[in-house]
């Protein structure tokens, strides 16, 4: 099915960051050397892992609060 005006992206083969399909080359790493692209990919991956750990901790806290509220509502 064709979606008019919808922007699609795909991961770059060098740096792993998502790039618009309409771009001829990745604007994240087109001016970087191969080594710099590897460092960019590594820094991005480490940043994503750090952010996901924080998000997981937040969801655990929210689940604990929901459990306490549901137990309090059940016992009252
Ligand atoms: Zn790239």
Image (spheres, rainbow, N blue to C red):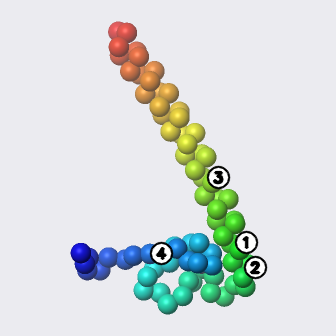
Element type where label 1 sits in the image: helix
Task: Give the distance between the C-alpha atoms of the residues marked 2 and 1, in whole angstroms.
Answer: 6 Å
Q: Which residue is mark 2?
A: 35
Contact between labelled residues 2 and 4, with CB atoms less than 8 Å apart: no
**Rendered position, 68 above or below 1:** above
Mark in front: 1 vs 4? 4
Task: Give the distance between the C-alpha atoms of the residues marked 3 and 2, in whole angstroms.
Answer: 23 Å
| Residue 14: quarter of image | bottom right
Element type where label 2 sits in the image: helix
Q: Which mark is residue 50?
A: 3
Q: Which mark is residue 39?
A: 1
Residue at 35% from the left image edge and 9% from the top image edge: 76
Instruction: Out of 68 and 13, give the one closest to the viewer.
Output: 13
| Residue 25: quarter of image | bottom right
Earlier in the chain: of badge 3 and badge 2, it is: 2
Element type where label 4 sits in the image: strand
Instruction: Out of 24 and 66, give the one closest to the viewer.
Output: 24
Residue behind label 1 places its C-beta within 8 angstroms of ligand 1: no
Residue at 43% from the left image edge and 27% from the top image edge: 66
Contact between labelled residues 1 and 2, with CB atoms less than 8 Å apart: yes
Residue density around tag 2, few if under 14, some if 14–19, many if 20 or more, within 10 Å: few
Q: Which mark is residue 57?
A: none
Q: Which residue is mark 4?
A: 10
Location of residue 36 in the rendering, given as x and y in whole percent from the top left corner? 73, 78
């Amino acid at each position: 099915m064709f979606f008019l005006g919808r922007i699609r992206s795909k991961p770059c083969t060098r740096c792993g960051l998502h790039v618009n399909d309409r771009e001829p080359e990745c604007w994240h790493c087109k001016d970087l050397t191969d080594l710099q692209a590897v460092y960019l990919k590594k820094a991005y991956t480490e940043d994503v892992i750090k952010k996901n750990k924080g998000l997981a901790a937040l969801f655990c806290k929210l689940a604990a609060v929901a459990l306490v509220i549901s137990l309090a509502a059940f016992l009252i």
